[in-house]
Image: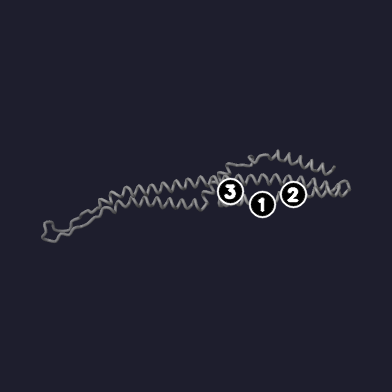
């Protein structure tokens, strides 16, 4: 009878706890999530690589524009004494074919810059999605861990009560042993959830490049 009572109390507590923690949404902070995304964009190596690639592409555009100056060469013609025009005379030399090619080269450099920028934007969106997914997984495991911790604390109290009654001879060893088995299963479940929580936390910290405790 006492064991049945224990099971009934444990069931009621589980239900009441579930009702109190029926959603993880109250624990979700979108303000904190935005900070995580910003931190990831600032710290993640691949995003930094795109910044350097864009700088290179910008320099290539500038280089293509400046090469206009190389298309025209200043030359000096030397006319020996006695010719129709004596002395040193300045002149210009340029290649029509190269001049015609140059606008296309500048356009190509600009297109390459645009492609790199779009690639970074695409990666930035993917990075945001990854951070969001890992953050929500982290909150989910944290909520479950808090729920299981409270549940286990209550179960432990109930087991102690049954143990007390067993020692007084008011409860059988079989029922006492069953209560211990149920409690042990709760402990194992909590430990598994702790592992999931630590892995979720580590995964989130890996993508943002910082410890969660440092994000204010």
Q: Earlier in the sequence, mark 1 or mark 2?
A: 2
Could you give the CA–CA distance between mark 1 and mark 3, rounded to whole angstroms?
A: 22 Å
Could you give the CA–CA distance between mark 3 and mark 2, rounded to whole angstroms?
A: 36 Å
Tell me whether circle 1 and circle 2 mark residues in contact (CB < 8 Å). no
* SS at mark 2 in the image: helix
Give the label, 1 or 2, closer to the camera.
2
Q: Nearer the viewer, residue 99 or 44?
A: 99
Residue at point 60% right, 49% down? 212
* SS at mark 1 in the image: helix
Q: Which mark is residue 185?
A: 2
Return the residue found at the far front.
174
Tell me whether circle 3 and circle 2 mark residues in contact (CB < 8 Å). no
Q: Which mark is residue 64?
A: none
Q: In the drawing, does residue 153 fall left or right of residue 200? A: right
Q: How many marks?
A: 3
Q: In the drawing, does residue 213 fall left or right of residue 65? A: right
Quarter occupied by the N terminus: top right
* SS at mark 3 in the image: loop
Q: In the drawing, does residue 71 fall left or right of residue 126? A: left
Residue density around tag 1, few if under 14, some if 14–19, many if 20 or more, within 10 Å:
some
Residue 177 image position (x, y, % from top left): 82, 50
Give the label, 3 or 2, closer to the camera.
2
Up-down relation of residue 199 to residue 29 (above or below): below
Residue behind mark 3: 215
Q: In the drawing, does residue 2 fall left or right of residue 72? A: right
Residue behind mark 1: 195
Could you give the CA–CA distance between mark 1 and mark 2, rounded to whole angstroms?
A: 15 Å
Residue 172 image position (x, y, % from top left): 86, 48
Residue 164 image position (x, y, % from top left): 85, 48
Residue 107 image position (x, y, % from top left): 35, 47
Q: Earlier in the sequence, mark 3 or mark 2?
A: 2
Q: Earlier in the sequence, mark 1 or mark 3?
A: 1
């Amino acid at each position: 009878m006492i064991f049945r009572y224990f099971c009934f109390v444990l069931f009621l507590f589980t239900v009441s706890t579930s009702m109190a923690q029926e959603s993880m949404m109250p624990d979700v902070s979108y303000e904190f999530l935005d900070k995580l995304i910003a931190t990831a964009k600032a710290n993640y190596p691949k995003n930094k690589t795109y910044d350097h690639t864009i700088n290179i592409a910008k320099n290539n555009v500038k280089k293509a524009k400046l090469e206009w100056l190389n298309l025209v060469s200043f030359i000096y013609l030397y006319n020996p004494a006695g010719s129709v025009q004596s002395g040193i005379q300045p002149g210009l030399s340029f290649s029509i074919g190269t001049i015609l090619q140059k606008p296309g080269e500048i356009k190509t450099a600009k297109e390459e810059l645009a492609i790199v920028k779009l690639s970074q934007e695409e990666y930035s969106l993917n990075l945001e999605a990854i951070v969001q997914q890992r953050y929500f997984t982290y909150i989910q495991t944290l909520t479950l861990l808090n729920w299981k911790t409270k549940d286990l604390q209550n179960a432990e109290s109930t087991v102690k009560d049954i143990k007390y009654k067993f020692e007084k001879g008011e409860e059988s060893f079989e029922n006492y042993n069953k209560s211990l088995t149920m409690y042990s299963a709760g402990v194992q479940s909590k430990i598994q959830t702790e592992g999931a929580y630590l892995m979720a936390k580590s995964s989130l910290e890996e993508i943002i490049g910082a410890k969660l405790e440092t994000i204010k």
